[in-house]
Amino acid sequence: MSLEVIKAEGLLLIGDPHIAATPPGQRLSSYTADILDKLEACLKHAKDLNMVPLLLGDLFHWPRDNSNSLLVDLIALFGPYKPFVLIGNHDKYQARFTPDVSMAVLDASNVIRMMNEPGPAFVLETPEGKVLVGASPDGFPIPKEFGREEFEQENGELLKVVWVAHHNVAFPEYKKPHYAIKEIPGIDWVINGHIHRPRPTITAGSTTWANPGNISRLAFTKLALERKPQAAIWTPQCIDLEKWDIPHRDFYEVFPNQDFLPEIEDADAAESKFLQGLERLAWKRTHEGSGLKQFLEENIDPEEPESKLIWDLYTEVTDGNR
Ligand SMILES: [Mn+2]
């Protein structure tokens, strides 16, 4: 196997940027510029530290329909740095990576090192020794073990094996766990994107699991008000990731000045299922509106007074497409 070998001190990890040309949720209109600024700050900082920049998935908030000007800005930004970019669930359309997604444009422009396939991705040659960096993009499992000895026989001794992932990992207080935190023979570190809230690093046997959290404040919550957007630094001898505060604007410069929703004990209940569903729908939408019809049928109560209005709007929009 011939993998790219890159000389650097370590990795600078950038969690789930969710960039978009139109602001998601309640973010104000400066969203795109704010996230571009953060990405640029991270890439410059990585260069200053001689670290390899690696995005942990969900570069995009919506996989397609991003404006050409945003893509041109990203091409200009990424070109000099060529960061590694793991594919997240938001980077794909209908759960598949296809040439019609925005990420494919960046890949074709040769400005990113796309991590679209599972397995070993590159060798990081540090002053302390060689590190293998592997990847599990969205849709591919985190391996149960890694054949390290076999790899070392062909490629030389490894100081560490680091695996980046974009998965539902059972960090404390995470509600949708799929992967238990346990030892993975042959892998020293699993560094995960996808879970936006930073989680404590946990070591199970010889494997350490880290989840540094995302760099973009997407939800208008007290948590987003309190926490600082941070990138994370991994070095071969580190015991935990080192956090780096990304220069960012004040919370009330990027969100409207309004009240928080009342605290509800069940955090899940506090989030609007309807809005979450609509957001999912936005990146699964079809020209025929069939996804929307199904969503409305499941969520609209015919007894509510606004239901007729919503259905009339739906009919007007979809009939216009025929
Ligand atoms: Mn995400």
Image (cartoon, helix red, strand yellow):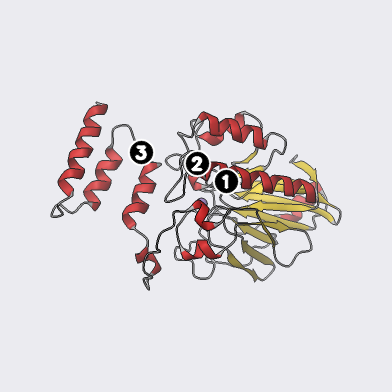
Q: How many marks?
A: 3
Provide the residue designation for mark 1. 35
Label 3: how many Cα within 10 Å (few below 14, some 14–19, many 20+):
some
Where disc 2 sits, the SS reads loop
Q: Amino acid at mark 2?
A: Ala
Provide the residue designation for mark 3. 285
Q: Where, by quadrant of the figure, is residue 146 drawn? A: bottom right
Residue 134, horizontal then vertical, whole percent: 67, 50
Contact between labelled residues 2 and 1, with CB atoms less than 8 Å apart:
yes
Where disc 3 sits, the SS reads loop
Q: Is residue 21 left or right of residue 292?
A: right
Q: Where, by quadrant of the figure, is residue 238 drawn? A: bottom right
Label 1: how many Cα within 10 Å (few below 14, some 14–19, many 20+):
some
Task: Quarter of the image for the C terminus: give it.
Answer: top left
Q: Amino acid at mark 1?
A: Ile
Provide the residue designation for mark 2. 20
Mark found first going from the N terminus, 1 or 2: 2
Closest to the observer, 123 or 311: 311
Residue 199, horizontal then vertical, whole percent: 57, 66
User: Residue reaching furthest bottom?
Assistant: 265
